[in-house]
Image (spheres, rainbow, N blue to C red):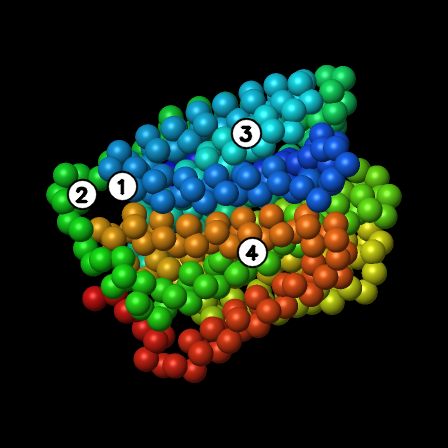
Amino acid sequence: MRRNVLLLAACQALMFSGNSMLIATSALIGYDLLGADKSLATLPIAVQMIATLATSIPASLLMGRIGRRAGFICGSLLGLAGGVTGSLALELGSFALFCAATMLVGAFNGFAIYYRFAAADQADRRYKPKAISYVLAGGVIAAFIGPNLASWTRDITGVLFGGSMLCLIAIYALSFLLQLLLDIPRPTAAERAVAGRSMPAIARQPRFVIAVCCGMLGYASMTLIMTATPLAMQAIRLPFADTAFVIQWHVFAMFAPSFFTGHLITRFGMIRIMATGAMLDLVCIAVNLSGTSVWHFSAGLVLLGLGWNFLFIGATTLLTETYRPSERAKAQAFNDFCVFTSTTTGALTAGALQHHLGWATVNLGVLPLLLVIAAALFWLQFAPAQRASEVR
């Protein structure tokens, strides 16, 4: 189990290295490839998230039949195809082809988002939050690999960010090789034959609803602000090196707490840790509204990353307590479909909000989402009947 957790953490690091590279560059590539109307600059990252959303359910159900290892390998092949397509898109100067590349990367992510669940599925109840945390901790490496690779390789091919696409191909190739080493048993025929409860029955559990709600709104809040940040920095003429620096420390803050978030959940409980995450997001908004220096962007996005970590790991842990082993494929698929529906909406909205209404509106738009999270956690904290696991 621990060997698999380490391999999954390495795969997670590679996935988020590619994602952080695209976060730092996609909006700028889109801006460069578009004509007069720049409001669609974040469309490539939104297309990526739409593809993740569309793939999340079939990916989970497929892995429920053929196993995690085979599913992850299929996903890596899609990522490789995305890197090749992205490189070709920049050579041809095609915005549509670049969107196709991010779509393939998004399809890869539709498989890779289950790394954390693959670790949790093999762990006992007490070790579960730690297994989830350790896999997400692999993203710490991504904080330094992705944005720095984007900055260092920006012009090496003579095409803007062409080198970044070549790095993306290498990242997915290495991910493919690591996944060959995973040792996760395929579901047995008996396990596949047990259907468990229906999805509506699972989704009626209040704890399930709150886990999904907090996961999707916390992720959407982070995506909305994070995706708009490169455009906001470009609007005030800050150099790309500063943008890469800000994204680097944001991604670091997203995953560095994972080394101890699981321990904090075990000691203080999921509700308190998730509430702390929501509070950190509120402080992020206050910092972002107070100024637009590199320091403000950096501090705000570090707080945003910390808040996302506490909310996402807490919500994932809470979710794993609401379904039986035979129900995990559909329950996890439903959760991640909801999460990436809200995340995609945030990414698609970010460009238009930033372009037409500005940085302050982007941040204020997150406040209602955080208020819903706070209300859900307050209800869960003070409704004792909902604290215990509802799986019977």
Q: CA distance from mark 3 to mark 4?
A: 23 Å
Residue at (50, 23) in percent of width and height: 81
Apparent side of residue 114 relative to residue 25 in the rendered image (left or right): left
Cβ atoms under marks 2 and 1 closer than 8 Å: yes
Residue 226's spot in the image, x, y percent? 66, 50
Cβ atoms under marks 1 and 3 closer than 8 Å: no
Cβ atoms under marks 3 and 2 closer than 8 Å: no
Residue at (42, 50) in percent of width and height: 336
Which-is-in-front pick, marks 1 and 4? Answer: 4
Q: CA distance from mark 4 to mark 2?
A: 33 Å
Label located before the other in sequence (4 or 2): 2
Q: Secondary structure at mark 1?
A: helix
Q: Is residue 350 visible?
A: yes
Label located before the other in sequence (1 or 4): 1
Work out whether 202 lies above or below 15.
below
Q: Nearer the viewer, residue 317 or 378?
A: 378
Label located before the other in sequence (3 or 4): 3
Q: Amino acid at mark 3?
A: Ala
**Disc ID at residue 220:** 4
Work out whether 180 lies above or below 210.
above
Q: Nearer the viewer, residue 40 or 158?
A: 40
Q: Which residue is mark 2?
A: 192
Q: CA distance from mark 1 to mark 4?
A: 27 Å
Which-is-in-front pick, marks 3 and 2? Answer: 3
Q: Amino acid at mark 1?
A: Gly
Q: Which residue is mark 3?
A: 100
